[in-house]
Amino acid sequence: MPPFRSLPEAELQRLDDDALIDYMRRARGAGHPTAGLALAIMVHGRWSNVLGRVRLKVPAAHAEDVAGDIVADAIASAFDGSSVGQFVTWLNTITRRAIADFHRRGPGRFGPGEETAAEAAAPSEEGAVGVRDAVERVMARLGPDHRRVIDIVIFGAGTAADAVRAVPGMTEGNVHQITSRFRRALRQELEAGGDTGRA
Amino acid sequence: MADVEKLLHEFIEEDRTAGPADPLRYVERLEGIDRAELEALIDGYLARAPRRAFDADAFERSPARGVAEELARALGGVSGSWPALLPRLRHRARIARSEVVQRLADELGARGAKVEKVTRYYHAMEQGTLPSAGVSDRVLEALGRVLGVTAGRLRDAGKDAGGSGRAAGGAEAAAFARVGSPDPAQVDLDAFTRGAAGSRDEPRDEIDALFTDGA
């Protein structure tokens, strides 16, 4: 491994999540203070998106606590190498799991007397699969080109023309069909799951 | 369905141009399946959104700073993720730190001056300055009873997060100081583990052994 080389803030900002975590690890090993800056960039950069997702599903009084757990758990486990796959995928897994845990156990994952030895020993991936959300279930049924169209037009707020430019062979007519079908499928999935949007 | 799409685009526009948008302000404008769909789409957008650019001023004012400080103590210290976990556990259990310490001291049979020693050791666990490998199972079992978790959970938390549960070099410990946490390198660990925290003449006793000898 090459010797540690410290980076200025602007360059740290350009690193992707996994590279930034690797940098944190190496800066810690070298005792370099930019480890703290890299950590601040990481936490700040992910905090509000996680908090927004939690606020959609958890009462306001508990949202910051749950979001704090998620960000801390995700970064700590990525840092020590116990996470699975890319950081952003891992963060989404932890987010879904933490929200599901909140609704299963109520506020305070580790409230007095709530955690059994069995629960402590089996936190992991099975739970994450069980709580995959409706969007991901519908996306999983699409081919790569159609997923790309949805990412651009729906989640990227792009235009049909943007999708046509990005996906070879795509027409604007196809884009409209794909997005309409996606949204119908999503609504069916939500209704089938009993999620009819009651506040 | 048109309202859902329009609101999603407005949300994304605000989120990208004016900083984090509040999703509830948007979903509350709808009801029923439309609301559920907008929630799902906003959630999907946030799950895919890139990391936000660092803004030091916003970070200073954000709850994210507290999370980063806990993580810094965990990642830069020698107590695993205890600095992130222990304050959360007592917060959720709605127990003040002084009460945690008193109950821990009772569990360990500490009286008088030994309670102060338990206080200092517990503080070091939360600050990430007490090597977790030295903390005995008896302490973790007692603390687990106070906080409502298993001793195994506490032991595991002491091992991960980059802190290896052993004494780190000062440079490693200082690496995360810039995030704003107290610098663990400034803590005199040798003095601490002698039960001194300022007084090197204090005799070692069974409380020191419980927190520093392991097993």
Image (cartoon, rainbow, N blue to C red):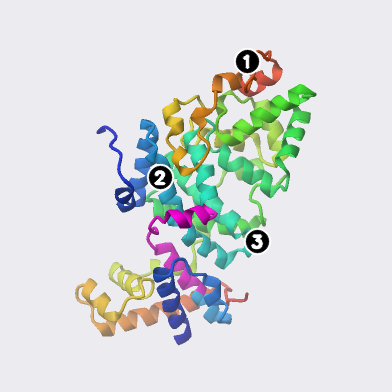
Chain for disc number 3: A
Q: Residues within 10 Å of mark 1 (few under 14, many from 20)?
A: some
Q: Is residue B179 visible?
A: yes
Provide the residue designation for mark 3: A61
Q: Position of residue A44 (x, y in %)?
A: 45, 54
Residue A161 coordinates in the image, percent (x, y): 25, 80
Q: Which amino acid type corresponds to the residue marked 3 in the rendered image?
A: Ala
Mark pair 1, 2: CA separation: 35 Å
- Majority SS type along the magenta span: helix
Label tally: 3
**Mark 2 belongs to chain:** A
Residue A66 at x, y percent in the picture: 58, 55
Are labels 1 and 2 assigned to the same chain? Answer: no
Asked which secondary structure carries label 3, the reply is helix
- x%, y% of residue A182? 40, 77
Q: Is residue A188 left or right of residue A66?
A: left
Indicate left or right for A136 with B208 as reference.
left
Can you tell which of label 3 and label 1 is closer to the viewer?
1
Can you identify the residue that label 1 sits on? B200
Q: Nearer the viewer, residue B76 or A149?
A: B76
Chain of residue at mark 1: B
State which tag comes first along the sequence, 2 or 3: 2
Q: Amino acid at mark 2?
A: Leu
Q: Nearer the viewer, residue A165 or B59?
A: B59
Q: CA distance from mark 2 to mark 3?
A: 29 Å
Q: Circle 2 is placed at which residue position?
A: A37
Circle 2 SS class: helix
Query: How many other residues sit within 10 Å of disc 2, few (<14), some (14-19) or many (≥20)?
Result: many
Please tell me whether residue B55 is drawn above or below residue A185 in the rendered image.
above
| Residue range highlighted in magenta | B39-64
